[in-house]
Amino acid sequence: MNAQQAVEIERIVSTFTEEDNEAVYEEVELLDKQMRIGYMEKMLREHLPHCEAEQEPLFSGALTDQSVTWAKESQFAMQLFQKNDFLTKTAIGNPASAQNAIINVAAIGITLNPASKLAYLVPRDGMVCLDISYMGLLHLAQATGSIKWGQCKLVYSNDTYESNGLDSAPTHKYNAFGDRGDVVGGYCTVKTPDGDYLTEEMSLAEIKATEATSKAKNGPWKTFWAEMARKTIVKRASKYWPRAERLDNAIHVLNEEEGMHQEPIMPHTPESEVIEGENARKQEVYELVEGICQKMEASESMDELKPLFADAFKLTRGMKLQQNVQAIYSERKAQLEGATS
């Protein structure tokens, strides 16, 4: 570029209005976003080749709700990765955690659809984790028939709140458009299939105590405190609802990945007894899973293989043994499909 060209460019730029500049900046930002999304998607395809080749059968094998499909959930997951660079980098750095998180979607039977706001993929401690909202927990409870209806609300210092007992809905009045003051607690009320009401209440001190035990206290507890408080209340309330496996699985995943202690906290047990008990439980799981794997290897159809895999996968959650279960499933699936082709 010569001096005359430089002067001409400077003259043209000086005529730009503020609106012109904003339009240019918006176009550049859009291009940058499109390039970043394209790059992240390319990186995911390169570093997570098993996403489609291996993960779909694992997803299908763990499925507990037929309305949750791989075709939809894999796209919802990709949308979450595209919107969060750090989540994508975490998935690339720890692809096994991303795989397990998405399979947990199938095992629990919940959707990552952002419009539903029931569940999300989040980065935590170098892993991709499945996070379920309090609305997601209530949704699972309703979908499984554990409850007919439920709500969870926080109570503020300027509200009028009166407890009517565990078997009745409380009286809660407040000005939704005024200053409600500071949070003093919260409650969850549900209606059971029998038509009874169950109410669980937690004070602010109890919510704070739960927050203190969570490894996530420096993450969502900082940015989405009200959401986490409601989820804490719903989790405790669910202990008194009719049991539902999918809801139990969801709370188990949350407790493990948030690093939360389950209530009530048990009395102190000597470390030697704890280790002995854990080893005994692990041995029981190993023996049980070994029997299931033998049945998987002898299965004669996919209809027979899939439920066996789902049982073994759930039993080995969080264990290295789960990789062996996945390998046996993939090998037997290939044999069965080869025999029918």
Image (spheres, rainbow, N blue to C red):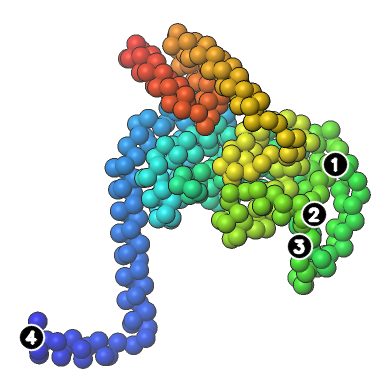
Question: Viewer-proximal residue, 154 or 285?
Answer: 285
Q: Residue at x 77, y 55 (%)?
A: 205
**Mark 4: amino acid:** Asn
Q: Residues within 10 Å of mark 1 (few under 14, many from 20)?
A: some
Can residue 271 be seen at all in this image of the molecule? yes
* 1 vs 3, front mark: 3
Distance between the alpha carbons at the discs numbered 1 and 3: 24 Å
- The residue beneath circle 1 is 197
Residue 103 percent across, percent down from the top left: 49, 34
Residue drawn where x is 40% and y is 45% of the image: 91
Three-letter code for the amino acid on which mark 2 is drawn: Ser
Of pointers 3 and 4, the one earlier in the residue sequence: 4
Q: CA distance from mark 4 to mark 1?
A: 82 Å
Q: How many marks?
A: 4
State the quadrant of the C terminus.
top left
CA gap between label 2 and label 3 equals 9 Å
> Mark 1: which amino acid?
Tyr
Q: Which mark is residue 208?
A: none
First in sequence: mark 2 vs mark 3: 3
Q: What separation in Å lies between label 3 and label 4 (alpha carbons)?
A: 66 Å
Q: Work out how far the residue at label 4 is from the one at label 2, CA to CA, in angstroms.
A: 73 Å
Picture coordinates of residue 291, whole percent (x, y): 52, 11
Mark 1 / mark 3, whichever is N-terminal: 3
Q: Which residue is mark 4?
A: 2
Q: Residues within 10 Å of mark 4 (few under 14, many from 20)?
A: few
Which residue is disc 3 drawn over? 183
Disc 3 residue type (three-letter): Val
Along the viewing direction, whichever of 13 and 318 lies nearer the viewer: 318
Q: Position of residue 287 (x, y in %)?
A: 54, 14
For mark 2, what is the residue? 203
Q: Image point 33% across, 71% down: which residue?
A: 27
